[in-house]
Image (cartoon, helix red, strand yellow):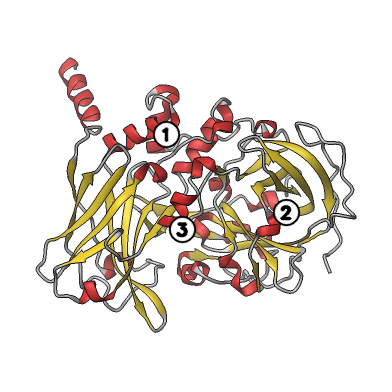
């Protein structure tokens, strides 16, 4: 028994070795092995398979991801000088001192997708060798930290076509856990082994029920009920990845927003499974009964405790099918700066996960380095009536999409994304208060409770 325990301990800690240069296996799938793939595949997909990863450490934060060819026609693709600390969970300062906020911030940071794009050029992406096709046609490389166990990453390579960018290569790999642990501790100032942090990051330890102390995130400057409309009979909208993910969604008879609650017992989504792909054979359910009755929206101006900026917060209120009260709080955004878009172009709006200081699902590397996640005042949660965190993953909500109306910039469109962004599940039209007509209530460190009401439709 003692020998077995020692062997097990040796295996466990051997996972956390570090090194200046590490060879990493890359898993590739043929088209028939992953028929559910919702990505926009190129006709060249799988023609350039056959790679391994050589991870080269430049310094304590930066690495070169060198994808070496195993076939003579395949190019060597190097994504250079990547600050991996920006793709590793960290803690905004205002969440670090509160145990509940800390757990939520770290959990949502790891268990949300972060896909970062890089573009060909000597300083970013270098393509050499092979038959020359990749050197001539590679338009974008992307690294993705998957919304799964720590270390599960993927690489995607795309080229331009008349129909837009199409992915011709996809590979899955495990970022070395020793380097992950080192970066995680460097980012957070915490021990990876305390408070079951390693288990939270590597296996999902559900933090549902943790109290969310909103007053530690912001100070309320003003708040008021605003006109907010939800039309259950409006047809469901599709754009961007939601078009591609029709094949990973089971929603029989769902045509309008209200159907997601009415038909919730039959709405299912393909589950995202290790190392990072969708499995339609494992259905993911929902708890959309919590959204049965939309009862109103409160708008707040708040002062961020992270950087002192005055920003916006929206709180959507619901009475569930069982009578339970639910709130969705989205804050730390400047709504006046939200993109102005036609409704069909919603994917170009604020397209965000839920959590504290989480980056967008998709961004390029220049945007990431200019806006480090730990410096973000953004936060969003699903809360119960007592202010406790509700597991939005189990509820099957991934985050909000927000933009202003192209014909009326004071009108904000807010959509809710389903689990894994397979679908939009709700649409709200929210009338922002005018500066000269806003009626603010007395500000407190915690927002006062405002009785929910059904708002009149925004014109």
- Disc 2 to disc 1, C-alpha distance: 40 Å
Nearer the viewer's eye, disc 3 or disc 2?
3
> Going from the N terminus, do you reach mark 3 or mark 1 first?
1
User: Where's residue 319, x and y in %?
Assistant: 76, 47
Q: Is mark 3 on a helix, strand or loop?
A: strand
Query: Residue at the spot x=44%, y=42% of the render?
Result: 110
Label 2: state its secondary structure. loop
Which quadrant of the figure has residue 237? bottom right
Q: Residue furthest toward the front? A: 122
Q: Is residue 34 left or right of residue 148?
A: left
Outermost residue to the top: 2
Q: Are marks 2 and 1 in contact (CB under 8 Å)?
A: no
Residue 456, percent from left and from top: 86, 61
Instruction: Kindly indicate whether the residue at mark 2 contacts the one at mark 3 (C-beta within 8 angstroms).
Output: no
Q: Looking at the figure, which quarter contains the C terminus?
A: bottom right
**Residue at the disc numbered 3:** 363
Q: Where is residue 306 in the image (x, y as percent from the top left)?
A: 61, 36
Q: Distance between the residues labelled 3 and 1?
A: 20 Å
Residue 162 or residue 230, whichever sits in front: 162
Pointer 2: what residue?
292
Q: Left or right: 100 with respect to 112?
A: right
Local SS, label 1: helix
Distance (Cα) linking label 3 and label 2: 33 Å
- Residue drawn at x 24%, y 29% as measured from the top left: 12
Q: Give the mark, 3 or 2, whose residue is nearer the N terminus.
A: 2
> In which quadrant is the N terminus drawn?
top left
* Image point (70%, 52%), residue name: 291
Where is mark 1, residue-wise?
Answer: 187
Residue 241 at x, y percent in the picture? 49, 67
First in residue order: circle 2 vs circle 1: 1
């Amino acid at each position: 028994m003692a020998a077995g325990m020692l062997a097990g301990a040796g295996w466990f800690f051997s996972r956390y070795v570090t090194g200046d240069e590490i060879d990493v296996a890359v898993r590739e799938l043929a088209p028939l092995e992953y028929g559910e793939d919702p990505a926009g595949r190129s006709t060249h997909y799988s023609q350039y398979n056959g790679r391994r990863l050589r991870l080269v450490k430049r310094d304590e934060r930066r690495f070169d991801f060198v994808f070496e060819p195993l076939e003579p026609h395949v190019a060597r693709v190097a994504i250079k000088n990547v600050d991996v600390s920006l793709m590793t969970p960290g803690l905004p300062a205002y969440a670090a001192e509160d145990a509940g906020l800390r757990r939520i911030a770290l959990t949502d940071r790891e268990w949300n997708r972060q896909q970062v794009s890089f573009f060909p050029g000597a300083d970013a992406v270098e393509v050499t060798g092979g038959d020359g096709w990749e050197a001539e046609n590679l338009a974008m490389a992307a690294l993705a930290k998957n919304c799964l166990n720590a270390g599960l990453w993927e690489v995607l390579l795309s080229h331009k076509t008349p129909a837009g960018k199409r992915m011709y290569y996809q590979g899955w790999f495990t970022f070395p856990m020793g380097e992950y642990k080192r970066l995680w501790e460097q980012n957070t100032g915490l021990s990876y082994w305390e408070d079951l942090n390693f288990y939270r990051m590597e296996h999902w330890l559900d933090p549902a029920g943790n109290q969310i102390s909103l007053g530690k995130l912001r100070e309320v400057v003003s708040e008021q009920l605003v006109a907010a409309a939800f039309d259950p009979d409006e047809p469901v909208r599709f754009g961007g990845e939601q078009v591609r993910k029709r094949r990973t969604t089971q929603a029989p008879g769902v045509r309008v927003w209200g159907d997601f609650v009415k038909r919730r017992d039959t709405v299912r989504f393909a589950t995202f499974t290790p190392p990072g792909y969708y499995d339609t054979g494992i259905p993911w359910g929902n708890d959309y009964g919590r959204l049965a009755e939309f009862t109103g929206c409160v708008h707040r101006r708040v002062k961020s405790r992270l950087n002192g900026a005055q920003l916006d917060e929206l709180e959507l209120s619901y009475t569930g099918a069982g009578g339970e009260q639910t709130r969705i709080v989205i804050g730390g955004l400047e709504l006046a700066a939200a993109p102005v878009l036609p409704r069909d172009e919603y994917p170009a709006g604020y397209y965000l996960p839920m959590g504290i200081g989480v980056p967008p699902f998709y961004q390029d590397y220049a945007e990431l380095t200019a806006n480090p996640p730990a410096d973000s005042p953004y936060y969003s949660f699903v809360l119960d009536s007592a202010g406790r965190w509700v597991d939005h993953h189990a509820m099957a909500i991934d985050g909000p999409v927000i933009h202003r109306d192209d014909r009326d910039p004071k009108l904000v469109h807010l959509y809710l994304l389903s689990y894994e962004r397979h679908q939009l599940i709700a649409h709200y039209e929210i009338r922002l208060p005018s500066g000269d007509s806003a009626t603010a209530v007395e500000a407190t460190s915690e927002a006062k409770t405002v009785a929910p009401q059904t708002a009149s439709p925004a014109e």
